[in-house]
Amino acid sequence: MAFASYYKLDNLVAIFDVNRLGQSEAAPLQHKTEIYRKRCEAFGWNTYVHDGHSVEELCKAFWEAAQVKDRPTAIIAKTFKGKGIPDVEDKDNWHGKPIPKDKVESVLGTIQGRIKSSKLLCPELPAEDAPQVDITGIKMPSPPAYKLGSKIATRKAYGVALAKLGQSCSRLVALDGDTKNSTFSDHFKKEFPDRFIECFIAEQNMVSVAMGCATRDRTVVFVSTFAAFLSRAYDQIRMGAISQSNINLSGSHCGVSIGEDGPSQMALEDLAMFRAIPTCTVFYPSDGVSTEHAVELAANTKGICFIRTSRPETPVIYPAEEKFEVGQAKVIRQSKTDRVTVIGAGVTLHEALTAAEELAKEGINIRVIDPFTIKPLDRATILASARATGGHVITVEDHYREGGIGEAVSAALAEKPKITVHRLAVSGIPRSGKPTELLDLFGISAKCIIAAVKSTFAN
């Protein structure tokens, strides 16, 4: 309600069906409509109280609401559940229950007896006067501008990519929850302030607003905040999937690698959360180039899309001309003598590459895979690499063991014989500290990967 009042949404009318009853007992305020009115007015809403069973009163309220400027309108409609039905009206314990068969005829007779006109009511259909728009085939205006070896955090690369894509698509809208200077969505705001919506620290409402923006496929919507904070909006996200909404969510500050901010800010369950959403595509880019491609692909992918971004700066490992596809992993280091396949993403992919360099000095070669999308997972590439390295697979992730990369890989390889997956992941509640210290402490650093590779041979 504060959001609608702040933005003076005078084209918004909210109807409160105050019917007194909850599911299992009476609602706290029951029929105290004056309290509802005062609360709505306190949020800056133009508010009316009416008999919710009176069509005339409601039509009048809608007309009056259309005359009000710079304020949303609330209609407090006092109603009775089961209105007009004997022994049901305003009674407890009827929620979600059908009328008993032996009473159906009597109830239907009562309702039909209240109909005073035989005239067939046919309301006019809404006018289809909205102009046609096309939000398909959106492309970046230019290739990524990053140089190999240069460093950038994927959270910043997200903001840069969002602003770039906004140049190509005038229907792209960005929302943030008061974290725009950390998610770098402020890059988009600076270029397109009229297409940026600040939703403040109200993630449930932010996701709901995003779904509203995406309705009828008229805009391409990107939402950003810390990945940990999206857990507050999980019900809205799952309902978005149920209603087949097309929205894109970017969650930054994932894992213990954010360092000193501590566990309250560390997203360590977000991959599990989004992998469980039926319509969700989960991107996990590891450098600036792959992040830019993730944003472009998400804009053109139906359903819910989640882009997981990291806080630390990491080297660019892909050339600007590299091609990316949903569900297509990258084998970024391999040889004919690889003995183990190591799969990492984001920060841990770079730890895996560092481990590979150190192991190579000892004559031990490992294969390193960047999955790019965790859902769908490139099962074919992972399986081929697992077989090429004697069935030895190690996953390493800045995420809890439950529901992350390790479980996704294990599920993909579960029915294949002679393949073993060893999972390195964060265990237990983390703490504040320097990123490098925390990667070591929770067993997902290059040093820990090296130890796991050597342990594979020892066993």
Image: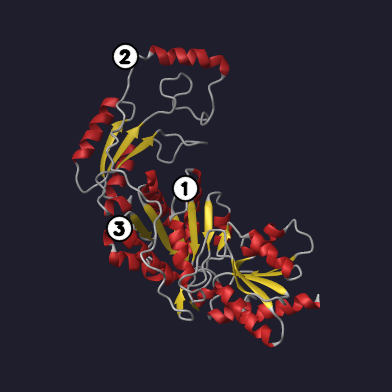
Which residue does the numbered mark 3 point to in the structure image?
Answer: 195
- Residue placed at 41% from the left, 49% from the top? 211
In this rendered view, identify the residue nearer to me: 340 or 434. Answer: 340
Q: Which mark is residue 156?
A: none
Q: Badge 1 local density, few (<14 within 10 Å), some, or many (20+)?
A: many
Assign a secondary structure to mark 3. Answer: helix
In this rendered view, identify the residue nearer to me: 427 or 38. Answer: 427
- Residue placed at 58% from the left, 53% from the top? 276
Does 10 sit left or right of 79 as displayed?
A: left
Assign a secondary structure to mark 1. Answer: helix
Which residue does the numbered mark 2 point to in the structure image?
Answer: 119
The image shows residue 386 at horizontal and vertical percentages of 71, 67
Q: Are marks 2 and 1 in contact (CB under 8 Å)?
A: no
Q: Quadrant of residue 47?
A: top left
Q: Quadrant of residue 172?
A: bottom left
Which residue does the numbered mark 1 point to in the structure image?
Answer: 240
Q: In this rendering, does residue 439 appear at all?
A: no
First in sequence: mark 3 or mark 1?
3
* In this rendering, the label closer to the viewer, 3 or 2: 3
